[in-house]
Amino acid sequence: DIQMTQSPSSLSASVGDRVTITCRASQSISRYLNWYQQKPGKAPNLLIYAASSLQSGVPSRFSGSGSGTDFILTISSLQPEDFATYYCQQTDSPTFTFGQGTELEI
Amino acid sequence: QVQLVQSGAEVKKPGASVKVSCKASGYTFTNNFMHWVRQAPGQGLEWMGILNPSGGTPTYAQKFEGRVTMNSDTSKSTVYMEVSSLRSEDTAVYYCAKDSDHNALDIWGQGTKVTVSA
């Protein structure tokens, strides 16, 4: 299976900050990489698909980049509602693994 | 609107089986694959498998091969996921999620909490 490693595992930031979260794949996955946001007690929400495409309804302060093995999720200016846990997911191989998550805290 | 509604919480004893359902509405059920994902308490997301609601053999994560069965009933627009030989480590919230046209999980069910306890 392809392994996905996110860094950092947790991150403290303030409203208005620019934040980046990194996701690394154990082998090349082209651009088959999605990003999700999850708030406590809720189902995950799709933010970015195919590495850099913004899901409909997601604010434009979220962006994604990367290809091959290294990917980045950027939040340009943190809002109070952005404090949550973020997961990457690869969809290149027949089995679609998630990263371990990055908890974004105030 | 597009919606996935899952069955209610379950409490099972070790060694038993559990079957979770996920009813889809608001779109053509057979047009999109469906995923199952679980999340143990305080842990991350774990992808379990994917199935084509129209039929065919599901693809399971290696960890779940032989112990998880996914299938669908097109007449009810419902997919099912069954876990057998339950153990305490299977205690988790189980989610179904619709695959978008871009290999991403764009719509999620509300989750079904499964507790395995003697």
Image (cartoon, coloured by chain):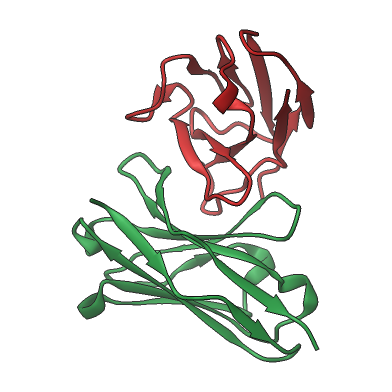
Where's residue B116, x and y in %?
73, 80
Rendered residue at 63%/74% (across/down): B114
Residue B78 drawn at (x, y percent): 32, 73
Front residue (pair B114, B38): B114
Q: Position of residue A40 (x, y in %)?
A: 63, 46
The hue in which chain B appears in the rendered picture of the protein: green
Q: Nearer the viewer, residue B39 or A7?
A: B39
Answer yes or no: is residue B47 visible. yes
Residue B1 in the image: above or below residue A99: below
Residue B117's spot in the image, x, y percent?
A: 77, 83
Which residue is located at x 79 percent, y 77 percent? B88
Q: How many discs mark residues in the rendered view?
A: 0
Left or right: where does residue B4 sit relative to residue B84?
left
Q: Is residue A91 visible?
A: no
Residue lying at 31% horizontally and 57% vertically, measured from the top left: B3
- Between A21 and A29, the residue placed more toward the observer is A21
- Give the quadrant of residue A75: top right
Residue at point 43%, 59% (across, down): B109
Image colour for chain A is: red
- Asked where in the image residue B23 lies, by quadrant, the reply is bottom left
Quarter of the image holding residue B77? bottom left
> Height in image: B18 above or below B46?
below
Residue B76 against residue B26 in the figure, above or below: below
Give the position of the C terminus of chain A as an image quadrant.
top right
